[in-house]
Image (tube, rainbow, N blue to C red):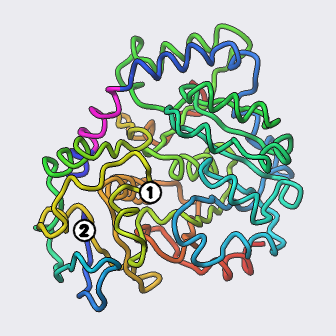
Amino acid sequence: MAISLETIMEKIQCASYDDWVKNFALNLTNIWNESSAAELTPTNSKTKLKSAIVIGRGPSVKKKGHLEMLAKSNFDGAIICCDGALINTLKAGVTPEKFPNFYVVSIDPYSPAMKFYDDKIVDQYGDKIKGIFSIIVKPTTVENARKSGIKIHWLHSLFDYEEGKKSFNQISALMVRAKNHSDGLPAIQTGGNVGTSSWFIAWRILKCPTVALIGINHGWNEDDPWEKIISHGSNFVKTDVVDRKSATFQKLFKKIHNPDFNCNCIVDPLFQFYSSALKEFIVRSPEWLTTINATEGGSIFGDKIIGMSFDSFLGKYH
Amino acid sequence: MKTNFKKETKESSDNLTKYEESKDTANDVSPEEFEDFILKSGAKGSFMIYRSKKKDDELGIDTL
């Protein structure tokens, strides 16, 4: 089943393949002249951080006041902010001045992501933020980040490496290596979204042995408006394409129980796709990694996932 | 995908949908239903998942 949904998503995503190639072509000169995400990997135990917090923009962040709690804490690990959560995170007082190990991640190759860097507060703190960008991110998105002073670090997002020398992943890697990056760039599994990408970056690139998640609901609260749930929180998704009283609707928008936090959440089709993949990758992650879901809601629970309140996490892992 | 439904105890925000208690997979969305919704709604998402015969590669590659 999971594979079938992945095949469908692959087909839908690959319809934009031409845009990805175009994005890469327009990014290439900057890629050559800017840093590899590999530079962010600690080179010795003194610079290695013990823990990271991945911040998504799921509904529980606001509901539970997690950003305000974090702003008041003395957490000294890495803050890895999904691009869509950046502006609210900074506005809540979680800034790189207070948390110097502050990263933002973009993997989305499409235009809407550019607005995530278009705010005065990003300009205010940009020069203290380390940005991690896929080589196929829309150039206008990267340019907005660059203008704000964010230092760009590049990586590959894997999608067709398996297909060999003629794959885009391998051809683009050869082109990147042609100038300044003779050692290449790291290549990550995105899991299809920036939240899962950020979790991978936390342990694969930053080598943090403990990774906590907040705002990674991969689902909606029961009291979220249906329009928001059906549209996946987007302004671009049509909400009138399925009869809300039909059995299909109930399957598309499942209500599931999260036993870790004893709450229900509604998982839309995209989150069904994303959450099953993230949970699979957490199960397959190395033994030295601890993944703590401090989101206090949502659909991420199960094997190798420790559910814990964010307050408890901050008390235990500051 | 395994699910763990609980009986609905309060009505949803706009009172349009109630869920039945179920623990089997019969209520999982089919690939056809999934694709139909995604295509009609335009709910595209951000990117795709990478799969490989080399399972370790699916967790990332240090340098490419």
How far across and down, in percent of the image, does residue A25 sit? 56, 13
Relative depth, front residue between A242 and A168: A242
- Secondary structure of the residue carrying tag 1 is loop
Toward which corner of the image does residue A218 lie, by quadrant?
bottom left
How far across and down, in percent of the image, does residue B4 sit? 26, 77
| Residue under the image location 85 percent in, 47 percent down | A124
How packed mark 2 is, by other alpha carbons closer than 10 Å (few <14, some 14-19, many 20 or more), is few
Q: In the image, is residue A174 above or below residue B55?
A: above
Q: Is residue A99 left or right of residue A86?
A: right
Relative depth, front residue between A25 and A227: A227
**Magenta stretch contains residue A260:** no
Which image quarter is the C terminus of chain A in? bottom right
Residue A307: which numbered mark, if any?
none
Three-letter amino acid code at the position of disc 1: Gly
For disc 2, the chain is B
Three-letter amino acid code at the position of disc 2: Lys
Relative depth, front residue between A137 and A183: A137
How far across and down, in percent of the image, does residue A120 sit? 79, 47
* Residue where numbered disc 2 is placed: B2
How far across and down, in percent of the image, does residue B21 sit? 18, 83
Number of labels in the image equals: 2
Q: Which residues are magenta?
A: A6-15
